[in-house]
Image: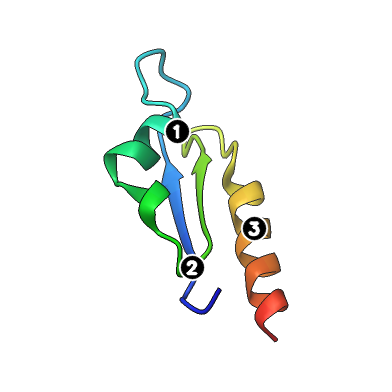
Amino acid sequence: MKGVPVLVFANKQDLVNALQPSEIAEGLNLFCVRDRAWQIEGCSAKTGGGLPQGMDWVVKQIQSKA
C-alpha cells in the first residue's frame, strides 16, 4: 500500500444509539479504498476508551513504512 494511512475515531461509542464502526466505514465508502490502510476505531472521548488502540495502530502503520 502506498497512500497515507487513514484513522477515523468513531466517538460516542458509549451511547446506545452510536453507529458501529462498520456502519461508519460503509457510510464513508471506505471498503472501496484500496490504495492505503485505513482503520475505524470505536472510542469514547468521555472515558478515553479506544484512543490508545487507535494511536497504537497509527504508530504501527508509520513504523511499517520506515
Query: N-terminal of the two: label 1 or label 2?
Result: 1
Image spot of residue 22 (x, y percent): 45, 33
| Residue visible at 41% across and 47% down in the picture | 31
Q: Would residue 13 be found to the left or right of residue 59 on screen? A: left
Residue type at mark 2: give it: Arg
Place of residue 5 in the rendered image (x, y in percent of width and height, measured from the top left): 50, 68
Q: What numbered label is drawn on residue 22?
A: 1
Give the quarter of the figure containing the C terminus: bottom right
- Frontmost of labels 1 and 3 is 1
Of the pair 61 and 42, the residue shown nearer to us: 61
In three-dimensional space, the C-alpha distance between marks 1 and 3, rounded to whole angstroms, equals: 17 Å
Instruction: Point out the tag, 3 or 2, that comes first from the N-terminus.
Output: 2
Residue with the mark numbered 3? 57
Within 10 Å of the Cα at label 1, are there few (<14), some (14-19), or many (20+) other Cα atoms?
Answer: some
Task: Give residue 9's position: percent from left, percent from top.
Answer: 45, 47
Q: Alpha carbon of mark 3 to alpha carbon of mark 2: how far? A: 14 Å
Task: Tell me the crowding category of disc 3: few under 14, some 14 to 19, or many 20 or more residues within 10 angstroms, Cα based.
Answer: some
Element carrying mark 1? helix
Query: In the picture provided, is 8 more to the left or to the right than 59?
Result: left
Q: Tell me the amino acid under the disc marked 1.
A: Ser
Q: Nearer the viewer, mark 3 or mark 2?
A: 2
Q: Hey, what amino acid is under mark 3?
A: Trp
Residue 23 screen position, x and y as percent: 37, 30
Question: Looking at the rendering, in which quadrant would you find the N terminus?
Answer: bottom right
**Which label was assigned to residue 36?**
2
Q: Residue at x 46, y 76 (%)?
A: 3
User: On screen, 43 above or below 66?
Assistant: above
Q: Are marks 1 and 3 in contact (CB under 8 Å)?
A: no
User: SS class of the residue under badge 2?
Assistant: loop
In front of the other: 7 or 15: 7
Q: Residue furthest bottom?
A: 66
